[in-house]
Amino acid sequence: MAAEDANFTGVAGRYASALFDLAKDAGGIDAVAGDLAGLEQMMNESADLRDLVKSPLFGREDQTKAMAALLDRAGASDLTKKFIGLVATNRRLFALDGMIKTYKALVAQYRGEVSAEVTSAHPLTDVQVQKLTETLKAATGSDVTLSTKVDNGLLGGLVVKLGSRMVDTSLRTKLNRMKLAMKEAG
């Protein structure tokens, strides 16, 4: 069972592990991963969708209907639709972000890949993503799956999270270190 192998716990871990096991049995790991990636992108781009998922003000029925309509329109697989429907019915949509991240981690582990989360001040170009992927692959000796996001507050540079390791080369962090060093010296 995936949950035992990965030792994922909590609501998000249990749901994601169950989904992974079902997708694996049905031969739909990639289809579900694609559906969840699309859903994650929609949540990142839509404040209304984030509110629907996170807010306890929306009822179970409203959340279930809205998510079903969204997934139908997105062309999601039946397994993904049933899973999100169950999550909404059980009032667990608040943990959907964690479920998606855990599912990605389970897929990466299954494939022998390492997942890396990269935060940059500006969107990375395809060439930059490719070079970063190659560099991380050389460093880890494993295939690397990147997920990227933008944080304008970094000012410049990158923050790379690879497993339990984090490399922060952001300009914001460098300026904060310099500010701290100046306070200590003064």
Image (cartoon, rainbow, N blue to C red):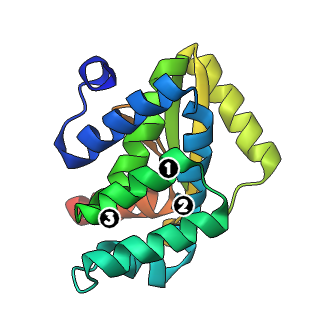
Q: Nearer the viewer, residue 69 or 173?
A: 69
For label 1, the residue is 80
Q: Residue 136 vs residue 166: left or right?
A: right
User: Residue 99 location in percent, x, y?
Assistant: 35, 48
Q: Nearer the viewer, mark 2 or mark 3?
A: 3
Residue at x 25%, y 32% (from the top left corner): 8
Q: Earlier in the sequence, mark 2 or mark 3?
A: 2
User: Residue 86 location in percent, x, y?
Assistant: 33, 56
Q: Earlier in the sequence, mark 3 or mark 1?
A: 1
For label 2, the residue is 39
Local secondary structure at mark 3:
helix
User: Residue 126 location in percent, x, y?
Assistant: 80, 48
| Mark seen at residue 88 | 3
Vertical comparison of 68 with 62: above or below: above
- Look at the image and tell me whether residue 105 can be seen: yes
Give how far apart the Cα atoms at labels 3 and 1 are.
12 Å
Q: Residue 130 vs residue 179: left or right?
A: right
Q: Which part of the image, by quadrant, shows the C terminus? A: bottom left
User: Residue 53 location in percent, x, y?
Assistant: 36, 72
* Amino acid beneath label 1: Thr
Vertical comparison of 175 with 168: above or below: below
Q: Nearer the viewer, residue 135 or 54?
A: 54
Q: Are marks 2 and 1 in contact (CB under 8 Å)?
A: yes
